[in-house]
Amino acid sequence: IEVLERGIRHNGASISTYRLPDGAEGMAHTQFWVAHRRGKVCLTCGSPITRISIRGRGTYFCPECQPE
C-alpha cells in the first residue's frame, strides 16, 4: 500500500510521458529504485541495475539484491 500511496502523491504512472487532465506532468517515474535504471547503480547496494527481456517486456533488477 505504501508504494501505491507514494505513486498517487507523485501524480503518477510508470511512464515518463504521463500527463494529468490539466496537462501537468506525472512524477511517479522519478521515484523508481530499479525500473528504467539499467546501468545506473542500485540505491541499496551500489551494484549496476540489469535489464532482461521476458516475453518481450523489459524487466529491471539488481543482481545482488534480487538474485535469480
Image (tube, helix red, strand yellow):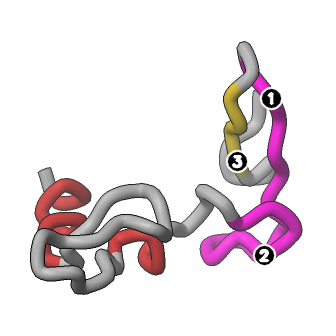
Residue pushed farthest bottom? 24
Mark 2 or 1, closer to the camera: 1
How far apart are labels 3 and 1 at the CA level? 11 Å
Mark 3 or 1, closer to the camera: 1
Q: Looking at the picture, tell me which residue is in the foreground, 33 or 46.
A: 33
Q: Which residue occupies 34% across, 79% down?
A: 27
Q: Which residue occupies 71% across, 70% down?
A: 42
Which residue type carries mark 1?
Ser
Q: Is residue 63 magenta?
A: no
Q: Secondary structure at mark 1?
A: strand
Q: Is residue 46 magenta?
A: yes
Q: Is residue 43 left or right of residue 14?
A: right
Rendering quarter of residue 52: top right
For the magenta stretch, what is the residue range?
37-54
Which residue type carries mark 2?
Val
Q: Which residue is mark 1?
A: 53
Question: In the rendering, at what x and y percent does residue 40 appear?
Answer: 80, 75
Q: Quadrant of the C terminus?
A: top right
How far apart are labels 2 and 3 at the CA level? 11 Å
Q: Which mark is residue 41?
A: 2
Q: Which residue occupies 54% across, 68% down?
A: 33
**Who comes first in sequence, dot 3 or dot 1?**
1
Q: Which mark is residue 61?
A: 3
Which residue type carries mark 3?
Phe
**Who comes first in sequence, dot 2 or dot 3?**
2
Q: Which residue occupies 72% across, 14% down?
A: 55
In this view, 50 is above or below 9? above
Badge 3: residue crowd in 10 Å (few <14, some 14–19, many ≥20)? many
Question: In the rendering, at what x and y percent does residue 26 appear?
Answer: 30, 76
Badge 2: residue crowd in 10 Å (few <14, some 14–19, many ≥20)? some
